[in-house]
């Protein structure tokens, strides 16, 4: 597999740094994990578009660029219509409602949507996709992609607990949110991770390598890498926009 980081900013994009969007090329398919603000333009710049899309949850920093992607596929790349769109309950309904798309709207010709619950597993070409429950204020998924040669787990947005650690067990690469830095305070926000916690999950799951992502835009990702690396002996890096990783 090859992972291409289109964007990795936590919560909002900044110039040259889109919010969450990761392209995963398997031998058979190109899968987009999340489609946050700035991700559509990053795909257009590269002239690469997905065969399938997985959205982790309904927060805007993970799904809003599905709307410009829809217009592009609707008007200018009709040959690409019919893209499978996998998302938890409520995500596609919200996006469709934003453009007033009823059940017969061409939104549902461009995207073939399927609601995914935690515990579900689907096959996309040679890849098996397993979904776990993330700890977040809206229905949210963490995602494991397993091919004959490798495996990757993406946390989506999550606090501690949930299915992330179990899903990540033994995987080659953990792409894990690390929104915050420093020691988690006792009154910590329960729906995101600190960099040290990303490192602890990577260690407990015995993954081969860790990419921290979704770092809050005001923070220096290099600090997140150091903090996560203090908890995890394997390779740690930041999922910088434009980065390509062989998994
Ligand atoms: Zn987010
Ligand atoms: Zn979120």
Image (cartoon, grey):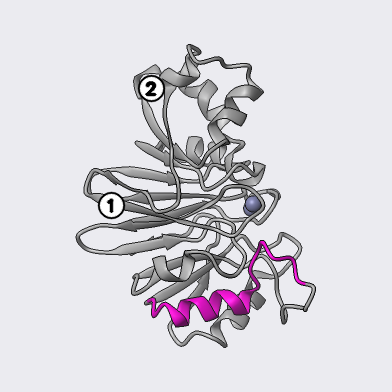
Q: Is residue 125 left or right of residue 190?
A: left
Q: Label 1 crowding class (10 Å Cα cut-off): few <14, some 14-19, many 20+?
A: some
**Quadrant (top left/top right/bottom left/bottom right) for the C terminus:** bottom left
Quarter occupied by residue 246: bottom left
Residue 142 rendering spot, x and y as whole percentages: 48, 56
Camera-side mark, 1 or 2: 1
Seen in the picture, residue 8 relative to 172 is either above or below; the reply is above
- Residue 124 in view of the camera: yes
Whether label 2 lies within 8 Å of ligand 1 gets the answer no
User: Which is more toward the observer, 21 or 108?
Assistant: 108
Quarter occupied by residue 188: bottom right
**Is 199 included in the stretch rendered in magenta?**
yes
Residue 190 rendering spot, x and y as whole percentages: 69, 65
Residue 144 rendering spot, x and y as whole percentages: 38, 58
- Residue 246 in view of the camera: no
Q: Which mark is residue 53?
A: none
Q: Which mark is residue 128?
A: 1
**Quadrant (top left/top right/bottom left/bottom right) for the N terminus:** bottom left
Residue 61 rendering spot, x and y as whole percentages: 64, 46
Q: Is residue 148 left or right of residue 59?
A: left
Q: Residue at x 72, y 59 (%)?
A: 217
* The residue stretch that appears in magenta: 188-207
Q: On the image, numbered disc 2 is attached to which residue?
A: 81
User: Which is more toward the observer, 45 or 38?
Assistant: 38
- Pointer 1 and pointer 2: residues touching (CB < 8 Å)? no
């Amino acid at each position: 597999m090859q992972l291409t980081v289109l964007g990795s900013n936590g919560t909002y994009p900044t110039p040259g740094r889109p919010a969450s969007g990761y392209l995963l090329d398997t031998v058979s398919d190109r899968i987009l994990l999340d489609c946050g603000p700035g991700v559509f333009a990053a795909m257009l710049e590269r002239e690469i578009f997905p065969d399938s899309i997985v959205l982790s949850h309904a927060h805007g920093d993970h799904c809003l660029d599905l709307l410009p992607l829809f217009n592009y596929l609707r008007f200018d790349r009709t040959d690409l219509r019919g893209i499978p769109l996998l998302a938890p309950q409520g995500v596609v309904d919200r996006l469709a409602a934003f453009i007033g798309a009823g059940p017969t709207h061409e939104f549902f010709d461009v995207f073939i949507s399927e609601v995914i619950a935690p515990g579900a597993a689907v096959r996309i070409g040679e890849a098996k996709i397993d979904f776990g429950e993330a700890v977040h204020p809206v229905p949210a998924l963490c995602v494991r992609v397993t091919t004959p040669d490798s495996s990757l787990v993406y946390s989506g947005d999550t606090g501690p607990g949930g299915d992330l650690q179990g899903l990540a067990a033994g995987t080659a690469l953990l792409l894990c949110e690390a929104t915050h830095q420093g020691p988690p305070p006792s009154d910590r926000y329960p729906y995101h991770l600190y960099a040290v916690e990303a490192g602890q999950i990577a260690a407990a799951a015995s993954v081969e390598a860790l990419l921290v992502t979704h770092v809050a835009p005001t923070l220096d990702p290099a600090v997140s890498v150091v903090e996560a690396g203090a908890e995890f002996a394997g390779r740690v890096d930041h999922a910088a926009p434009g980065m390509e990783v062989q998994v």
